[in-house]
Image (spheres, rainbow, N blue to C red):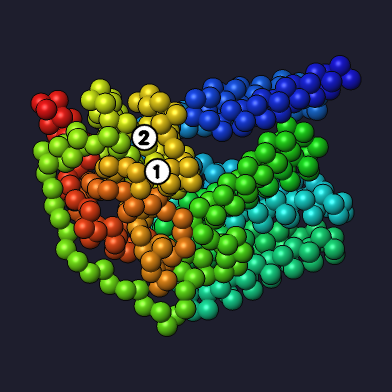
Amino acid sequence: MEYIFSLEFIYLIASVTFILGLKMLGHPETARRGNLIAAFGMTLAILGTIILYQGEVASIIYYLIGAAILIGTIIGWGIARKVGMTKMPELVSVFNGMGGASAALIGLIEFNHYVGEQLSILTIIAGVIIGSISFSGSMIAWAKLNGTLNKPIRLPKYNILNNMMLAAILLFGVYVVVTGTDSQIYLYLIFFAALAYGVLFVLPIGGADMPVVISLLNSFTGLAAAFGGFLYGNMVMLTGGILVGSAGTILTLAMCDAMNRPLASVIFGAFGEGTVDSDATSKSVLGTIKKTTPSDAAIMLNYANKVIIVPGYGLAVAQAQHVIHELELLLEKKGVGVKYAIHPVAGRMPGHMNVLLAETNVDYDKLIEMEDINSEFQNTDAVLVVGANDVVNPAAHNDPASPIYGMPILDVENSKSIIINKRSMNPGYAGIENELFYNQKTSMLFGDAKDVLTKLVHELKNM
């Protein structure tokens, strides 16, 4: 009883660190510390389980566990150290997929041990289905974000096909639970069918909607882990799974709101295909673009009273966060008020821009969320857009036929003057032209973000 109490006490401590860590992840200033606290709790739970487990275990198992931990740590540490900020969404997708695969494998291994126990078999089937969907879906999401799968692939009547397949998997799972069959073949049929559904579920979805899909799959992985915790009666697994599942669900709902996507359309509908009538045709963007130079842009920023910087994916690609912070400090020395406008999905991942700018010690109070800063654009002298595209596209307001119509955006078009830095006129993640580029108030500053911002800083220093 002493050992059991000690292990349960360790699980309690670990659960508290998970909750505390998750709370601290809500703010950039405490996020790093929160991540370390949660990681400490997980390490404590793993070591406690290995050391204090009371059952009979062959010594070879401990060597295998140690080897697995060592290999996983080396691989995970190496990947995390080398990955760039632009590849963070892909990394999240891969790691999330591994969690789903682990939950599914638990069910495959434990099925024969719980034959005849209906509630346990129900838990196993649920974990296998959800974990398998999360794994295969996350791998497809990774391929899309990585550029391996550039375009959505849609089978004829794919919505009906996907929904029928999901219904068939669930019904077959119910059949296995109710009949109490001990056939491992049935379980593997469910496993492979769920893997196939995960592929078919994510395959048709456009790249612009991947952040929402990753968030949804993350909640699936948490739910699958919670089922594993319920099966083993392991409170720390259950707590961790519930926290991941609930946090992922909340984030998914917030993302759907930010992108004007109903959650039902994510799961069952033509997600990523647009929500407009098929007869509608997106209007073409008319007008000419106006190019500018770093020298002219510097003059515009130098004589402004208020400047808002809109960071986007292009900023992350160029790794220009340090230069833009230098630009911000230089403008403030000249008496210019500077703020950053942050869209919820800027950079293709929630919080991407916040983390990127936090690397350079940008004051957190200057990072203003979309709903708080939109009212300020009309009183702003100049807006500098660096690498952002879809999140500032007025088509979201003006074009009912646009696939992003209705998506909340940063109202950059309301400002007095606009400078947009892009490498080229290529469309953004949604694959559509940006009306803002043709606005009479807009000046296009072409070039790599780091190079262009460096030239801007140089020009401003000489004024």
Q: Nearer the viewer, residue 370 or 194?
A: 370
Residue type (three-letter) at the residue carrying disc 1 = Glu
Circle 2/circle 1 CB separation < 8 Å: yes
Report the mark closest to the observer, 2 or 1: 1
Residue 226's image quarter? top right
> Residue at 80% of width from left, 28% of height from top?
55
Tag count in the figure? 2
**Mark number, residue 339:** 2
Q: Position of residue 182 (x, y in %)?
A: 80, 58
The answer, for residue 456, to whether it is visible in the render is: yes
Q: Where is residue 131 in the image (x, y as percent from the top left)?
A: 63, 51
How many C-alpha atoms fall within 10 Å of the one at disc 1: few (<14), some, or many (≥20)?
A: some
- The answer for how far apart the CA atoms under marks 2 and 1 are is 10 Å
The residue singled out by tag 1 in the image is: 376
Q: Position of residue 75 (x, y in %)?
A: 46, 32
Q: In this view, does 171 lie above or below 70?
A: below
The answer, for residue 352, to whether it is visible in the render is: no
In the orientation shown, which residue stands out farthest toward the top? 2
Q: Is residue 282 above or below residue 31?
A: below
Does 354 sit left or right of 460 as displayed? right
> Residue at 42% of width from left, 47% of height from top?
374
Does 414 sit left or right of 3 as displayed? left
Q: Position of residue 129 (x, y in %)?
A: 67, 56
Q: Which label's residue is closer to the chain start, 2 or 1?
A: 2
> Residue at 27% of width from left, 34% of height from top?
305
Does 196 sit left or right of 116 as displayed? left
